[in-house]
Image (tube, rainbow, N blue to C red):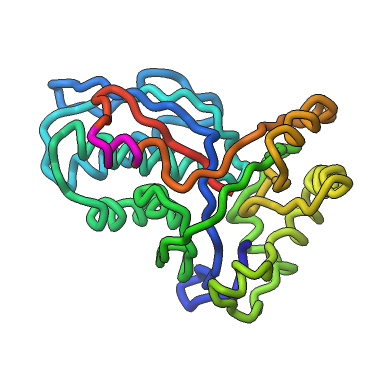
Amino acid sequence: MLHVLGRRADGYHELQTVFRLIDLCDELRFTPRRDGQVCRANDVPGVPVAEDLCVRAAELLRAHAGVREGVDITLRKRIPMQGGLGGGSSDAATVLCALDHLWALGLGDTALMSLGVQLGADVPVFVAGRNAWAEGVGDRLVPLELPPADYLVVQPDCAVSTAEIFRADDLTRSTPPLTINDFLTGKGHNDCTTPVVRRHPEVGEALDWLGQHGQPRLSGTGACVFLPCTLAQARALLAVLPARWRGWAVRGLSLSPLRACLEHGQARQEAGKGTAGV
């Protein structure tokens, strides 16, 4: 669900949305450096180092806390970019949480979430690592208990610019607000679906294809779409998925893998996982 309630004076939009974590994860590894440098240790196609949210998150945390150490960051991408799954925001949140642990800063979630929102409105929910109802620009969070669920996630052969969709003239900006109970009883939709499908017909084709098997939805601003179904159904559909698309059978989570490790005292210093959300 993603409702656009209106546009604010600062140009951002008032939203209501739900973040549902899934077990599609990127992997990040951290190697301490003594020279104070923050470096990306591997190439990530399509992401210049200067625009890398992982590097920016590490530099932001280092400056905020006055840390003298540096770090090498290795990122293994599995979450598709520009797919509406929050992969970049999740990776940034993972860097903040992992380096808070690695550098023994003890800043806590509130401080890390305040830093995270400087990198993107979706970063705080991934710092929290729990499913949430979100309002404002997506940064005012209420923890949300969701029932177990599995999904088929499909990525059409296109990339969607979030900024372009929120600038679109045909984006509805006057959806009446809902309550959490409204959502839990089945109400809600994604206001971005119409402008995305008009600009990217491939997304509409994927929604139509999945619509033969249930009620698919657009994830965020796309391009990924998802279908609630059993894992067995998801795997069966993957076997006949059009070759031009990518797909994943995924489980919904109540707690992100990194948050689970941190809360159970099992976090390894060298690795962390950034999870996606639909």
Residue 7 lies, with reference to residue 234, above or below; the image says below
Q: Which of the 4 image quarters holds residue 257?
A: top left
Q: Residue at x 47, y 23 (%)?
A: 76
Q: Residue at x 47, y 38 (%)?
A: 275
Q: Is residue 201 visible in this depiction of the protein?
A: no
Total labels drawn: 0
Q: Residue at x 19, y 40 (%)?
A: 62
Which span is picked out in magenta?
Answer: 260-265
What is the x, y in percent for residue 21? 51, 46
Residue 139 lies, with reference to residue 93, above or below; the image says below
What is the x, y in percent for residue 268? 26, 25
The one nearer the camera, 258 or 41, is 258
What is the x, y in percent for residue 197? 79, 53
What is the x, y in percent for residue 191? 69, 65
Residue 277 lies, with reference to residue 110, above or below; the image says above
Q: Quadrant of the N terminus?
A: bottom right
The one nearer the camera, 258 or 195, is 258
The one nearer the camera, 87 or 228, is 228
Q: Which of the 4 image quarters holds residue 39?
A: top left
Q: Is residue 205 visible in this depiction of the protein?
A: yes
Q: Main secondary structure of the magenta part?
A: helix
Q: Residue at x 74, y 68 (%)?
A: 170
Q: Say whether residue 36 is magenta.
A: no
